[in-house]
């Protein structure tokens, strides 16, 4: 080693995983001098080309729950640029362009990135880390990096945090400690295991595979592919070798959960290689010799991916119960929603790794207090090492969930610099500012509206050339009331004065029918089974669907009415239910209300074959124990109706949907061609120089997101638009865009003064789609708008 080189920064980020990248980018965008250290030659942590693990998050189990903020931006850009290789099934990615893209984000924000540099030792004075000693293994240099502000520990294992004296845990908590229903009776040192990843491809010629000496015989117990399905099926199931594909990712291996995954890393890696060779030998030379004859093992990750090691104490621990109950933490800074996914190294029969989904939780909040060390005054915790219990980590550890924690920490670090305070003091004194700044940076916080006093748009009113409202008004055909038929609502107002139904009575005589108001309320906020009932009418499904339980026994009748339908009549019939309704949980599709009409010979109910995402059609077939549903709808309207696609939604403080409804955006009327315009109008002229636009890019399922579908852009995205101001004499163009693929656009221009702002959507990517805009914000920013 040559002599020690001195560097200094405001914020030092340890690790180059996605949480680290988002922390560094956010802090640097807000004016901090940031250095990021990554011991590997590539960026992305587990998602880097060294392991290629697909970033996932809440969206796998929750409709429309794609992560926004910096991780959303990264994926959006990666999709547009196709920074990805195509593998079957599981979307794993070892494209070098992914690393290049992350580096561009860091460079663009002004972060100094030191690759192949590992953080070796902290320098601690009192309760502060004042410097970190690091080794640049590419250039054989030792570095001393002085830290003026915060250290963000995002290295997965937390070597620096542990050396600095931060309290941590390793292993499973006892059930009684946090009252976690799935925890073992007694605490132990068991963690989730580690795995290698591998790529296999189909070739044009036969390829042999000679297992290296010492390769053990294959046992179905290897890795999480070994399930009750047995050897044959398991190779095609979770582990994703499929002879009909061209290029597959293997994840057959897992071990290390009963060892010290850090100290025993070399032995664990070798054991994983043996498992992999054994599984591939089984495929190639034993069970599938004919089908696999042209298949070749082309790549194995040069290191093991770890799922868990140390977890550090913040000011609270997030537990399984917090996640499963969707605890509404007041200091929420992000959200999760993936399964409580635990890999038990011993498994049921004490001999194989078993993957257990203890539950599918509702969308749950990440509390800020779990993201800083309780012991040190300038240590943030990003990534899997934050303050979550072993079971809590089961849901938190998804990379896009972790990335949100990273962005929150980066923003908090910038505010700590601005106010000269500690992470804890920021929580105690400036929590609201932290949360509102996060929303402005496009992070998602459940149950928190944007309320930025500097946002001039909040003082405006909104109107549009057309808007799509709640209710289905036009029938394409009529369905006979030969069985119970109904409409299930994804959203509702706090009360229901009346429903109106479009009914047909072709006979001369008046007829009656019975209408009921029905309610479905889940027994608990989480699901214990990974049910795949799903919706037959949806082309693509998530790994599980909410709102698909339609067992009769689970629906309660709240009110019943008799309806009179005159003879020779086709029109609206009123059902005056006059009921108070439970408030709609905006982050869940599980609870529903239904208006059901009992069988009534001679009567029909109008149907519109168009699909509306605020309703679906239901009916009960003879002898069935559950309602069937389809994506179209009977014609109905309810009074009062909940908002749907009104222009005013762009000012309601929500910048995304969290479930199927409410949509929280302006949607121009279906069937009205583009262009369509949205206008904000103020009583007095306003002076401003910046407009933030948030377009819809959120597809219903994670599989439909462009990065996961190998597509460039979501079809709902606005592609072309103009932004204009009315300055008293006429409309002046502020921006005109084509080929837009971004959810959030920030337009900065020389200061203007006007009493109207107009956004004209000229095109969307999907054919015939309406304009869809979540939010418009207007600011008069100081010269360097994003710098605190
Ligand atoms: C086989 C496997 C499959 C998985 N499947 C999925 C999945 O499908 N979807 C999903 O979202 N998640 C998945 N996960 C979980 C997910 O990958 C991890 O939970 C996540 O990557 C942890 O993020 P992190 O930022 O904390 O750590 P990492 O992503 O591991 O990043 C930490 C980085 O810090 C670096 N580092 C460590 N020590 C130092 C040091 N001292 N100095 C400098 N740098 C250092 C490391 O090299 C690494 O690049 C999987 C994990 C594994 C192992």
Image: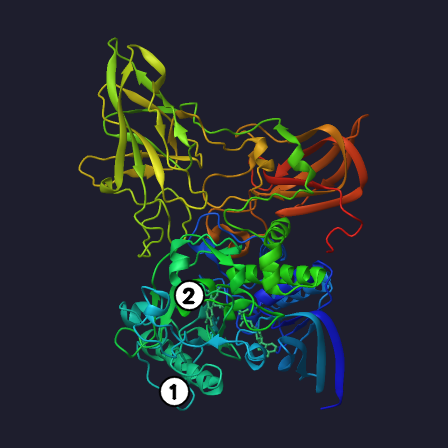
- Front of the two marks 2 and 1: 2
The residue at 25%/30% (across/down) is: 484
Name of the residue lying farthest toward the top = 508
Q: Quadrant where the C terminus lies? A: bottom right
**Is residue 433 visible in the rendered structure shown here?**
yes
Residue at the disc numbered 1: 215
In the foreground, 616 or 594? 594
Left or right: 8 in relation to 427:
right
Q: Quadrant of residue 747?
A: top right
In the foreground, 719 or 746? 746
The residue at 37%/23% (across/down) is: 498
Left or right: 557 in relation to 496:
left
Q: Where residue 43 sits in the image (x, y, percent)?
A: 62, 70
Q: Mark 1 falls on what kind of element?
A: loop
Residue at the disc numbered 2: 394
Q: Where residue 432 sits in the image (x, y, percent)?
A: 60, 51
Q: Residues within 10 Å of mark 1 (few under 14, many from 20)?
A: some
- Compare marks 2 and 1 and give the one earlier in the sequence: 1
């Amino acid at each position: 080693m040559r002599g020690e080189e001195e560097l200094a920064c405001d914020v030092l980020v340890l690790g180059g995983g996605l949480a680290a990248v988002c922390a560094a980018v956010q802090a640097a965008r807000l004016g901090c001098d940031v250095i990021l250290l990554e011991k590997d030659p590539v960026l992305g942590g587990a998602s880097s080309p060294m392991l290629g693990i697909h970033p996932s998050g809440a969206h796998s189990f929750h409709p429309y729950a794609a992560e926004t903020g910096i991780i959303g931006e990264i994926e959006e850009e990666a999709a547009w640029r196709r920074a990805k290789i195509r593998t079957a099934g599981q979307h794993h990615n070892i494209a070098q362009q992914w690393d290049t893209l992350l580096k561009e984000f860091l460079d663009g924000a002004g972060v100094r990135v030191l690759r192949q540099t590992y953080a070796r030792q902290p320098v601690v004075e009192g309760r502060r880390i004042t410097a970190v000693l690091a080794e640049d293994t590419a250039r054989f240099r030792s570095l001393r990096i002085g830290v003026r502000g915060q250290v963000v520990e995002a290295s997965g294992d937390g070597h620096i945090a542990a050396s600095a004296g931060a309290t941590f845990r390793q292993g499973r908590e006892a059930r009684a400690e946090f009252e976690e229903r799935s925890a073992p009776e007694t605490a132990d040192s068991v963690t989730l295991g580690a795995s290698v990843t591998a790529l296999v491809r189909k070739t044009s010629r036969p390829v042999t595979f000679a297992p290296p000496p010492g390769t053990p015989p294959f046992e179905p117990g290897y890795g999480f592919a070994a399930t009750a399905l047995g050897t044959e099926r398991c190779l095609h199931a979770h582990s994703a070798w499929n002879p009909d594909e061209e290029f597959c990712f293997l994840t057959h291996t897992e071990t290390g959960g009963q060892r010290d995954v850090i100290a025993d890393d070399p032995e664990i890696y070798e054991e994983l290689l043996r498992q992999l060779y054994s599984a591939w030998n089984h495929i190639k030379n034993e069970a599938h010799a004919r089908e696999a004859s042209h298949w070749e093992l082309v790549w194995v990750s040069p290191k093991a991916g770890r799922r868990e090691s140390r977890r550090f104490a913040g000011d609270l621990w997030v537990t399984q119960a917090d996640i499963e109950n969707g605890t509404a933490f007041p200091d929420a800074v992000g959200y999760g929603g993936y399964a409580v996914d635990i890999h038990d190294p011993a498994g049921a029969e004490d001999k194989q790794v078993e993957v257990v989904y203890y539950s599918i939780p509702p969308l749950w909040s990440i509390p800020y207090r779990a993201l800083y060390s309780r012991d040190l005054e300038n240590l943030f915790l990003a990534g899997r090492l934050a303050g979550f219990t072993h079971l809590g980590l089961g849901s938190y550890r998804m990379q896009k969930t972790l990335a949100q924690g990273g962005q929150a920490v980066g923003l908090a670090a910038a505010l700590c610099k601005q106010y000269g305070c500690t992470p804890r003091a920021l929580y105690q004194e400036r929590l609201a500012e932290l949360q509102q700044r996060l929303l402005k940076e496009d992070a998602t916080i459940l149950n928190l509206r944007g309320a930025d006093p500097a946002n001039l748009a909040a003082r405006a009113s909104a109107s549009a050339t057309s808007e799509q409202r709640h209710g289905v008004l036009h029938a394409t055909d009529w369905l006979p009331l030969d069985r119970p038929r109904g409409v299930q609502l994804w959203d509702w107002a706090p009360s229901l004065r009346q429903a109106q139904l479009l009914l047909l009575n072709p006979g001369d005589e008046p007829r009656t029918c019975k209408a009921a108001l029905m309610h479905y309320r889940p027994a608990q906020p989480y699901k214990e089974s990974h049910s795949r009932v799903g919706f037959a009418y949806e082309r693509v499904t998530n790994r599980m669907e909410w709102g698909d339980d339609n067992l009769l026994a689970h629906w309660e009748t709240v009110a019943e009415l008799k309806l009179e339908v005159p003879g020779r009549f086709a029109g609206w019939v009123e059902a005056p239910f006059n009921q108070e309704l439970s408030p709609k949980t905006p982050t869940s599709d599980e609870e529903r209300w239904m208006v059901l009409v009992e069988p009534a010979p001679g009567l029909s109910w109008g149907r519109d074959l168009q699909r509306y995402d605020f309703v679906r059609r239901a009916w009960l077939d003879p002898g069935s124990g559950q309602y069937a549903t389809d994506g179209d709808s009977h014609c109905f309207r309810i009074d009062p109706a909940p908002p749907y696609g009104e222009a005013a939604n762009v000012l309601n403080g929500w910048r995304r949907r969290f479930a199927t409804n409410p949509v929280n955006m302006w949607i121009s009327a279906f069937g009205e061609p583009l262009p369509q315009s949205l206008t904000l109008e103020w009583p007095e002229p306003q002076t401003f120089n910046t407009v933030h636009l948030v377009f819809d890019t959120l597809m219903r399922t994670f599989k439909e997101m462009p990065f996961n579908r190998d597509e460039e852009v979501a079809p709902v995205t606005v592609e072309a638009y103009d932004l204009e101001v009315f300055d008293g004499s006429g409309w002046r163009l502020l921006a005109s865009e084509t080929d837009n693929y971004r959810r959030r656009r920030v337009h900065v221009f020389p200061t203007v003064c006007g009493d109207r702002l107009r956004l004209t959507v000229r095109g969307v990517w999907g054919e015939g789609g309406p304009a869809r805009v979540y939010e418009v914000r207007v600011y008069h920013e100081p010269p360097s708008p994003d710098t605190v």
